[in-house]
Amino acid sequence: MKYQLVLQWSTAAMSDFDRIVTIEARIIEALPDEDGEVDGHDVGSGEMNIFVHTGAPERAFDHIRQILADEGVLEDVRVAYRELGGGAYNILWPIGLKVFRVS
């Protein structure tokens, strides 16, 4: 897997830690192995993140997007990816977002 895909919510938008664990579990179940694997989550500095290692970030997000919509959290998520070694993030969602960082 060449990229790290990050799903991010502010803790103000998603204040329930159990909810992020539920979403993470749904992604683990639904994401095809060839499109990526969940690498965990973290909470802190005002944000909650789920990390996915993938060779195809756009395709992985296509699978994940429906889960987020079903869970009612698509409108609050920010999604970006970068190479595993670091570098600048490429923003996928929401359209028009200009800055993305993980604290």
Image: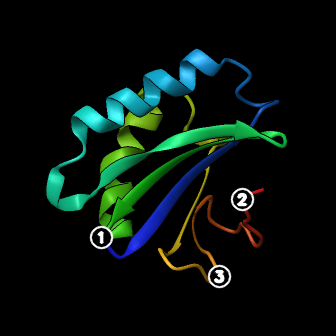
Q: Pointers 1 and 3 in contact (CB under 8 A)?
A: no
C-alpha separation, residue under disc 1 versus residue under disc 3: 17 Å
Q: The residue under label 3 is which amino acid type?
A: Ala
The disc, 2 or 1, on the residue closer to the chain's N-terminal end is 1
- In this rendering, does residue 71 appear at all? no
Q: The residue under label 2 is which amino acid type?
A: Val
Q: Is residue 66 left or right of residue 42?
A: left
Picture layout, residue 3 above or below residue 24: below
> Residue 84 appears at what percent x and percent y?
47, 74
Q: The residue under label 1 is which amino acid type?
A: Met
The disc, 1 or 3, on the residue closer to the chain's N-terminal end is 1
Q: How would you rate the neighbour count of disc 3 (Cα within 10 Å): few for under 14, some for 14-19, many for 20 or more?
A: few
Q: Which quarter of the figure is the N terminus placed in?
A: bottom left
Q: Pointers 2 and 1 in contact (CB under 8 A)?
A: no
C-alpha separation, residue under disc 3 versus residue under disc 2: 11 Å
Q: Callout 2: helix, strand or loop?
A: loop
| Residue found at x 45% / y 21% | 22
Q: Which residue is label 2 attached to?
A: 102
Q: How would you rate the neighbour count of disc 1 (Cα within 10 Å): few for under 14, some for 14-19, many for 20 or more?
A: some
Q: Callout 1: helix, strand or loop?
A: loop
Q: Residue furthest front?
A: 85
Q: Callout 3: helix, strand or loop?
A: loop
Picture layout, residue 103 above or below residue 13: below
Foreground mark, 1 or 3? 1
Q: Which residue is label 1 attached to?
A: 1
| Residue found at x 84% / y 43% | 45
C-alpha separation, residue under disc 2 versus residue under disc 1: 20 Å
Q: How would you rate the neighbour count of disc 2 (Cα within 10 Å): few for under 14, some for 14-19, many for 20 or more?
A: few
Q: Is residue 86 left or right of residue 63?
A: right
**Residue 88 numbered tag:** 3
- In this rendering, does residue 46 appear at all? yes
